[in-house]
Image: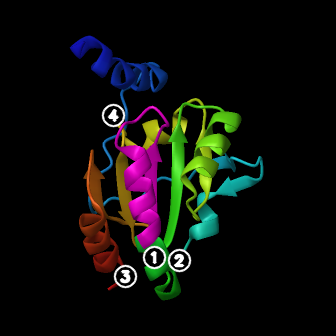
Amino acid sequence: MRALLLLPLFLLLAACGGDSSPAKLNIGMVAPAFDARQADGMPARAATWSGKPLVIRFWADWCKFCEGEMQAIDKVYRRLKPRGLEVIAINAGQDGKTVAAFMQKIGVSYPALLDENSAIAKSYGVVGLPTTYFVDARGVVRVKLIGESDEAAFERAALELLK
C-alpha cells in the first residue's frame, strides 16, 4: 500500500528526469522564465506576469491535496486580485484534456498552464506536489510552500507578497 502512495511522486521525479537533477530554487532567487500553453491551447509566457506579484502553483489531478487547496487558493485569489495578486496553476506532466477537465470540475478562476514534460517543474526544482512559489513583482521568490497547506497559510504568504 505504501508503495502505491509513493508511486505518483516517483512518476513525477521520473518525468522530471534527464541527465541533471532538478534546480534548487529557493527564497531570494529569481524565478525562471518559461513558455507554456494554457489548457485551452493559448500560449502563455512568464513575461505575461512580469512586474506583478505572482503565485505559481505546481499540481496534478492525482495529487490528493491539490483539489481542495486549489479551491481554497481561488477564494484568496478572488479577495486579493483587486490588490494586484495573480495566480497560475502549472500542471506537471499531464495533457491538456485532463487538465481542462479537472479545472472545469473544481471551478477555479485562475488559469492552468500545461507542463506536459515537466520541464518547467524541473527548472523550478519541484520534487513533489503540490509546490507553490510566491514571486514578487521583481521576479524574486519570497515564499515557497511544499506539500499540503491551508487557506490561512496561503493568504498569509499572499499578503506578505503584496506588501
- Mark 3 in CB contact with mark 2 (< 8 angstroms): no
- Which region shows up in magenta? 51-75
Q: How far apart are the alpha carbons under marks 2 and 1?
A: 4 Å
* Mark closer to the observer (4, 2): 4
Circle 3 packing at 10 Å, graded few (<14), some (14-19), many (20+), is some
Q: How far apart are the alpha carbons under marks 4 and 2?
A: 27 Å
**Residue at the image point whose x is 69% and y is 47% from the top:** 39
Q: Which mark is residue 51?
A: 2
For mark 1, give the secondary structure. Answer: loop
Type of the residue with mark 4 = Val
Q: Is residue 139 above or below residue 121?
A: below
Circle 1 packing at 10 Å, graded few (<14), some (14-19), many (20+), is some
Type of the residue with mark 2 = Gly
For mark 4, give the secondary structure. Answer: loop
- Mark 3 in CB contact with mark 4 (< 8 angstroms): no
Q: How far apart are the alpha carbons under marks 3 and 1?
A: 9 Å
* Mark closer to the observer (4, 1): 4
Circle 4 packing at 10 Å, graded few (<14), some (14-19), many (20+), is some
**Position of residue 162 measured from the top left corner of the image (x, y, whole percent):** 37, 82
* Residue 95 visible: yes
**Residue at the image point whose x is 36% and y is 27% from the top:** 21
**Position of residue 34 measured from the top left corner of the image (x, y, whole percent):** 58, 50
* Mark closer to the observer (3, 1): 3
Q: Is residue 160 above or below residue 73?
A: below
